Amino acid sequence: MPFRFVNHPLVLCAFSLLILWTAAYLGSRYRKQRDLDGEEKDELNLVAGGVLTLLGLIIGFSFSMAVGRFDLRMASEANEANAIGTEYLRAELLDADHATALQTGLARYLAQRIEWYRTRDARNVPRVERLQNATEHTMWAIVRSAATARETPVRALVVSGMNDVIDDAGYTKAAWANRIPRTAWVLMILIAAFASVLLGYNVRSASARFRGIYLLPITVSIALFLVADLDSTRGGLIMISPNDLLALQDQINSQ
């Protein structure tokens, strides 16, 4: 499986639907070549039930993981906004020159962080991060200059706030890199394919054919799409919107 598909949930949905439909069709084709007696049918139903139960558990567990990581990314965005807003206020504790320079740098940094969140093309992320790193170095130089010029507890508070701003950006990047393991995706696709083969093999009527060959692959593909969409950071329909950062930017611009 090309693992980059998990970064594009719609592609993953179409890919998994094709795999599961093919598996169910092959199972139904093999079913026509061989009839099962009563004992074999019971054993097949038992195995199919177990496989479906395992598939449901793994999808449910993966969905829980995706929701937890999505919530963590949302919380990281709020923490960043709080850290930047607090440091913007603390900058006023410095002398006028340092305060103006630091607040200008924070406003520029805030715009860069908003762009980072809104960037859907992962190829543009390194460019944004390079600009962000340059702004971080500039702001740190301003804070260091102010702190070394006269060491006071108040200026130490500004230094601590600058550390929080930089650290929270790093925590956010780590949260966005924390994805569902590839092994989980492999297991979900394989178990779903096995379940589709078994249900396709168990088809005996037109209604059962619809449930076994069409309904299950569609349902599982939609479930995988939802998990992948929550887990995807830039390629899905559900995106982390920098609402807190945007609100902070409006607040700063209105001053």
Image: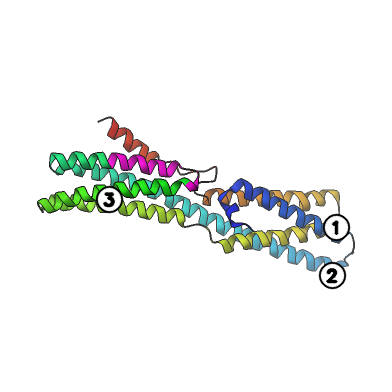
Q: Residue at x 45, y 53 (%)?
A: 176
Residues at marks 2 and 3, CA–CA distance in whole angstroms: 73 Å
Q: Position of residue 153 (x, y in %)?
A: 12, 53
| Residue 249 found in image quarter | top left
Q: Magenta residues?
A: 106-123
Q: Nearer the viewer, mark 3 or mark 1?
A: 3
Residues at marks 3 and 1, CA–CA distance in whole angstroms: 65 Å
Total numbered labels placed on residues in the image: 3
Q: Disc 3 residue type?
A: His
Q: Position of residue 92 (x, y in %)?
A: 17, 41
Q: How is the image coloured?
A: rainbow
Q: Is residue 169 magenta?
A: no
Q: Relative to residue 84, is residue 26 depicted above or below?
A: below
Query: Regarding mark 3 in the picture, which secondary structure is present there?
Result: helix
Q: Disc 2 residue type?
A: Glu
N-terminal of the pair, mark 3 or mark 1, is 1
Q: Nearer the viewer, mark 2 or mark 3?
A: 3
N-terminal of the pair, mark 2 or mark 3, is 2
Q: Nearer the viewer, residue 189 or 57?
A: 189
Query: Regarding mark 1 in the picture, which secondary structure is present there?
Result: helix
Which residue matches tag 3? 137
**Is residue 30 something that shows in the picture?**
yes
Q: Main secondary structure of the magenta part?
A: helix
**Quadrant assignment for the C terminus:** top left
Which residue matches tag 1? 29
N-terminal of the pair, mark 1 or mark 2, is 1
Left or right? Give the position of 124 relative to 229.
left
Q: Disc 1 residue type?
A: Arg
